Image: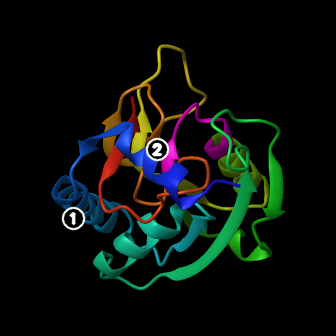
Amino acid sequence: MMTAEQARELWANSEEIVSAEAVQASLDRMAGEITEKMGDTFPLVLSVMGGAVVFTGMLLPKLAFPLEFDYIHLSRYNNKTVGGEMQWRVAPRESVKGRTVLVLDDILDEGETMAAIRQRIMDMGATNVYAAVLCEKVLQKAKPMHPDFCGFTVPERYVFGCGMDAHGYWRNLPAIRALR
């Protein structure tokens, strides 16, 4: 467990790469794109806990169409900086069958987690599965998928804020920061 002082040191050893204003502008743009694509489909929106909770809370009020909301929890990181084995804590419910599903997550890094989520939901009988992420990390290697809706790209660095954490801390920041 980290002390408050150690958490402050993390922040001090980072730099802002996306301002709070830019985050809000990207949310407005994404909401428009999602509404145009899905506004008539009465989608089931699934938020990936816990990182997507902030992104979800900022995006949902901007979606001005009827939707059903639920959550799932698939983790690879467990407050670490490197992904490990996938662990379903809360799997998708049967309500995905025959539905258009929008999965919200904070970041698409290597794409493994979102690809596993998409496959599981499709295997359960969803009609369509779309992925929306606040940011996608630009990597030098191929990914199994890319998001359908993306706020912005970030460099291949450890980023935090807007729901993304640094060793379990700083999810509450309104901007995106990267460790130096």
Spatial separation of the CA atoms under disc 2 and disc 1: 30 Å
The numbered mark, 2 or 1, whose residue comes first in the sequence reads 2
Q: Nearer the viewer, residue 61 or 158?
A: 158
Residue 143, percent from left and from top: 56, 25
Q: Amino acid at mark 2?
A: Leu
The residue indicated by pointer 1 is 28
Which label sits on residue 74? none
Q: Nearer the viewer, residue 168 or 97?
A: 168
Mark yes or no: residue 165 visible.
no
91 displayed left or right of 53: right
Please tell me whether residue 153 belongs to the stretch shown in magenta.
no
- Taking the spot 22% from the left edge, 58% from the top edge, the residue there is 20
- Image height of 62 relative to 2, above or below: below
Residue 33, percent from left and from top: 27, 58
Give the extent of the magenta segment.
Answer: 106-114
Please tell me whether residue 111 belongs to the stretch shown in magenta.
yes
The residue indicated by pointer 2 is 10
**The C terminus - image quarter:** top left
Q: Quadrant of residue 112?
A: top right
- Taking the spot 56% from the left edge, 80% from the top edge, the residue there is 69
Residue at the top extreme? Answer: 140
- Taking the spot 73% from the left edge, 55% from the top edge, the residue there is 74
Q: Secondary structure at mark 1?
A: helix
Q: Nearer the viewer, residue 148 or 58?
A: 58
Q: Secondary structure at mark 2?
A: helix
Residue 27, percent from left and from top: 27, 62
Q: Quadrant of residue 91?
A: bottom right
Q: Amino acid at mark 1?
A: Asp
